[in-house]
Image (cartoon, coloured by chain):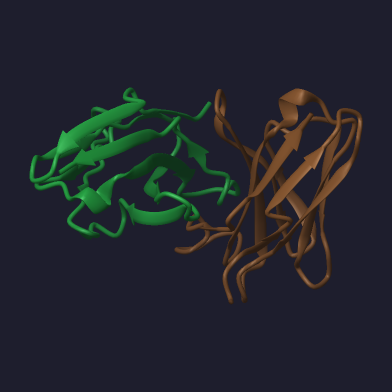
Chain colours: A green, B brown
Amino acid sequence: AQRVTQPEKLLSVFKGAPVELKCNYSYSGSPELFWYVQYSRQRLQLLLRHISRESIKGFTADLNKGETSFHLKKPFAQEEDSAMYYCALGNAGGTSYGKLTFGQGTILTVHP
Amino acid sequence: DSGVTQTPKHLITATGQRVTLRCSPRSGDLSVYWYQQSLDQGLQFLIQYYNGEERAKGNILERFSAQQFPDLHSELNLSSLELGDSALYFCASSVGLRGAGANVLTFGAGSRLTVL
């Protein structure tokens, strides 16, 4: 069974501080990992996916298959980063495309 | 707007009633997904359609049903509503069944259902 765990429901940091949102997954197949973000009063949107290996808005995430983790990191948090962040797990093969399993989400608050 | 469109934005109804939520996928996307977001359960996958056919089912109650029409819009029907059905219902779409973009979902703004 697929499972995604985001251990922190709430995370508060000060502007300029590093931030790390944790995500661990459980999956026996070939995983594809994503981070989705939901800013206040906006729709859920894709932030980044592991196969892209890119940095979006200063955020990066590395897939660690040994530790089954996909933590989201940013070296210097900004107030506009305050949002709900969801880690999501999909199937990179087979026929279950799009059936993403989401974690419970982490609300990040960046204080001035 | 070529993104995912959901109607209505808000819906308040009573227990025992039936409602229909509507979703138009992003232009060019053939797959439509329905998710339920509640405070205690987080984002839960309900059901997926591809080009009019049901492809995958998640934790969808028997009181709920969905369909995708020839023009690719989808409707989620919720019947015999209970208080616990109050939630935000998201529709999402993706380009297809497999390939590089298949797992990349574009979400709608959601329909907030309140059952009193």
Q: How many marks?
A: 0
Left or right of B82 on screen, residue B47? left
Q: Which quadrant holds residue B61?
A: top right
Give coordinates of residue B116: x percent, y percent: 79, 29
Task: Name the residue rendered at 65%, 61% in the picture.
Answer: B31
Task: Name the residue rendered at 68%, 54% in the picture.
Answer: B9
Q: Is residue A50 above or below residue A52?
A: above
Q: Which quadrant holds residue B94?
A: bottom right
Q: Is residue B78 above or below residue A37?
A: above
Q: Quadrant of the N terminus of chain B?
A: bottom right
Give coordinates of residue A48: x percent, y percent: 32, 55
Left or right of B41 on screen, residue A6? left
Q: Which residue occupies the foreground of this view, B31 or B41?
A: B41
Q: Is residue B93 above or below residue A106?
A: below
Q: Which residue occupies the foreground of this view, A29 or B45?
A: B45
Q: Which residue occupies the foreground of this view, B68 or A78?
A: A78
Task: Name the residue rendered at 35%, 35% in the picture.
Answer: A107
Task: Name the residue rendered at 55%, 60% in the picture.
Answer: B98
Left or right of A2 on screen, residue A8? left
Q: Which residue occupies the foreground of this view, A76 or A28?
A: A76
Give coordinates of residue A97: x percent, y percent: 56, 51
Left or right of B38 on screen, residue B114? right
Give coordinates of residue A79: x percent, y percent: 21, 49
